[in-house]
Image (spheres, rainbow, N blue to C red):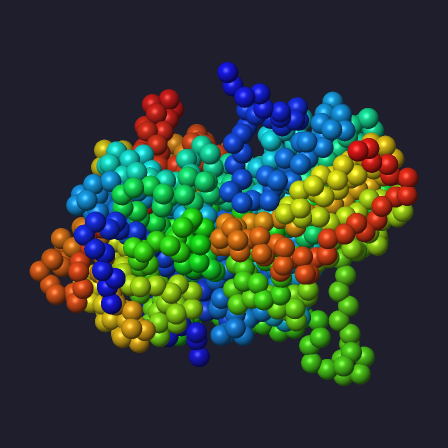
Amino acid sequence: MTRSRGNSARVVDAFVGEYASGKTEVSINRALDLSREFGTVTLLDLDTEEPVYTVRSVKPVLEERGLEVVALDADRVFGLGEAGVTVTAEMLGVLSRTGHIVIDVGYGVHGAAALNLVEGIEDEPQIRIYCVVNARRPMTSTPELIASYLESLDPCDFIVNNTHLGNETSLEVILDGIRTVTRASEITGIPVAAVSVAASVVERLRLAERDLGAPLWSLELFMVGSPRL
Amino acid sequence: MADEQKVAKAWRSETKPHRFCPGCGHGIILKGLADVIDELGIHGQGVFACDIGCSLLSWDFFNLDSVQTHHGRTIPVVVGMKRVRPDLAVIAYLGDGGGYSIGLQHLISSAVRNDPITVILANNTLYAMTGGQMAPTTLIGQKTGTTPYGRSAEDTGSPFMGPEIVAAAAGDAAYVARGSVTKFAELKQILKKALLNQVQRSGFSFVEFLSSCPTNWRTKPADTLKFVNEDMAAVFPLKEHRVPEDLGVDG
Amino acid sequence: MGVIQGTQRQFMTGNEVVAWAALAAGAQAMFGYPITPQNEIMHYWTRLAPEHGLRFLQTEDELSAGFATIGAALAGSLVFCATAGPGNVLMQEPISMAEMMRVPAVWVIQQRGGPSTATVIYSQQETRLTCFGGNGEGLRIVYSTSSHQDLFDYVIKALWAAWEFRFPAFVLGDGYQAKMREPVTLYDPESAGVNLPSVEPILKPEGVPSVDREPVHLRNTFNIEEELMDVLMGHIRDYLDMSSRVVESEEHPCEDPEVLVVAHGVVWRSAREAVSVLRDQGIKAGGFRPITLRPFPEESLRAAAEKVKLTVVVESAYGQLESMVRDRLYGLKVPVRSLLKPGVGVTAEEIVDSVIQFSKEV
């Protein structure tokens, strides 16, 4: 069930998922991949809850890599979690831009409904919603839990299997994750679009040589280290 | 050859565009307040105090001396100011969290004392900035960060009726009302009376405005307005609960 | 039968770990009020609540959250509370009651910048407040965690210790730990042989008062100074008696150390790394980490400091840990210097540079 994009249609990919599932890392990498292939890509930071670990914190780095990044500037974020992770008209109007668009939706009890804030989203024919899942997180650690999460909180078009255990990610973690997420995909009928893995792990475990049941997205990590604004 | 914009003196251009989200009710209330301060000619006396939460983003909104206080403690701060400087026109600006939860005792106590202050509260049914937790005014069934399955009346009671309760606590000298950011003309009238009651009659004023938070409600503009005008207004009636007889309002 | 089957290595944020640890220990209730950066503890607790029959109430403010926690503990519930920053300041009122009335309640503190509202991010500026914040003698058990594994282990331990020794117990984390993501092993404490809290009602145990048993009458008001002192000294004796069972510290020792780096909480991570770097550079550094800040591991610290020529205290506060260290090292000749960065994280490089600089000066 892949929506056909047509030749000239642009990409609008939105990433939702559990808290700390890896949405931001995956969206950044997706945006960079698209920009290598297609040119102008805008990455929108739609996280209104977390003060740290968002696209905003690495905006300058990403802009240097050629991405257009729409996020609150750190100096406009006043008082942070107390009073200031707001959205701007520029953020909400992102679909009016030309070129491809990747949206990091952020977390919250309303899940993918956060996309309602983006003007014109309901008329956007190319929108594809990916739910990022890390099967090594307690709330999404079994096929049943993942299926129930996909259905209740974050209805989506695709799953991105981002199962990992930080710097302890082993082959077993990856393969186990694939088994778990594949089963969840079978239960819900939502296909797995990709298995995303940190580039260093891909290299260490030689994952490119394996059949992981879905395309492999190799991730360059940006969200590492101490929390930054 | 720039257009000469008529902007209220109290409105501080240097801090515009403001930091509120598009569609946020705060911007509307504060603009109304700036207009009314000018219309009443009290720019020279006004002092503005805000709470913690999204109301905090108003700390440099006006060309008024302003102070950001602690969560729920804005009222005691302006009470202290007014006690020693009765010439000031003091304004306490709160959200529903600061006003009806942690600061509720101060709101009631001040109403009972008939402190000559003006308290303005923006009600958006949740603790917006800390991640959208439940607030006293969260509607039944509404999902929030601490009511992930929807608010239950059995567990946490019904939505808090602020002006109704404050009106009961306050006396005849108070002005207490509820308006909405979707009704701007009435909003300004309410603000005008709330300020006049302080500067003309040294009485206590408390006004609540139904306010919008599309960012945390995750609603499109039409649904945002619907939530305010239909869902919220059905629970929180728009009316003036206490109007002192001799409160005069110039045109 | 634990909530957690077997052991599971999971990738989590600190706040979630706290909720899961409390659940694993058998905690039944949580009270709280929104304040960054601990909100996710409440978010996860409320998500887990229906399945595990947990109780939760978001109260009107921190004062009521603290007093409700006390009420629940008195009623015999394994209960905890969480807060940060200005909320921690408000909590000192109920905590003082818990100290004097020996209420077994647990608070998780995720420190943020202070004083007052300041930042929502991080600091170690609530160290003194959490240890001594009330109008009393600091009869508290305070664990300072430096990793998610610590958060898991010590939330369970704090719940046990509060009930075992009947003093309010604290897990002192911070905004970085709350938000950081790292692997952690979740386990069932019972299966792991870890002490589980033994809980019983303090008010309304079995039986009808004055019929089956004497009524329980609790108070904390005294008429005469001497009476207060008697009661208080009883508590203090209990506190001192339990200290040796509770006190904990960790060292990153080396042979013939010349410099001792002292840090707690998340700064210990950088301190450990700095000590290794210094050794590689030929400087004989050792590290000392108090795990319990109350009771403070004075004996172990003195033993470690006696051997060295310089002690360097590092913290994200302006002297809160330093004063505790100086106080405990009184009488020793070793010079004490400090790297103080209130509200800001400290890197290993900064510690290495400081130690080298101080070594030249001393």
Q: Position of residue C256 (x, y in %)?
A: 30, 39
Q: Position of residue A147 (x, y in %)?
A: 35, 72
- Report the number of numbered marks: 0
Residue at (24%, 51%) from the top-left corner? Answer: A9
Q: Nearer the viewer, residue C179 or B165?
A: B165
For the N terminus of chain C, the image quarter is bottom left
Q: Nearer the viewer, residue C59 or B142?
A: B142
Position above or below: C221 against C27: above
Q: Position of residue B176 (x, y in %)?
A: 79, 47
Residue at (58%, 24%) from the top-left corner? Answer: B5
Lateral position of residue C296 relative to residue C234, left or right: left
Residue at (76%, 57%) from the top-left corner? Answer: C220
Residue at (39%, 37%) from the top-left corner? Answer: C346
Q: Nearer the viewer, residue C362 or C355?
A: C355
Residue C335 makes an appearance in the image? yes
Instruction: Pick out the residue farthest to the top.
Output: B1
Position above or below: C269 against C82: above
Lateral position of residue C175 relative to residue B76, left or right: left
Residue C237 makes an appearance in the image? no
For the C terminus of chain C, the image quarter is top left
Q: Position of residue C304 (x, y in %)?
A: 40, 43
Residue A42 position by quadrant: top left
Residue C29 position by quadrant: bottom right
Q: Nearer the viewer, residue B26 or B79?
A: B26
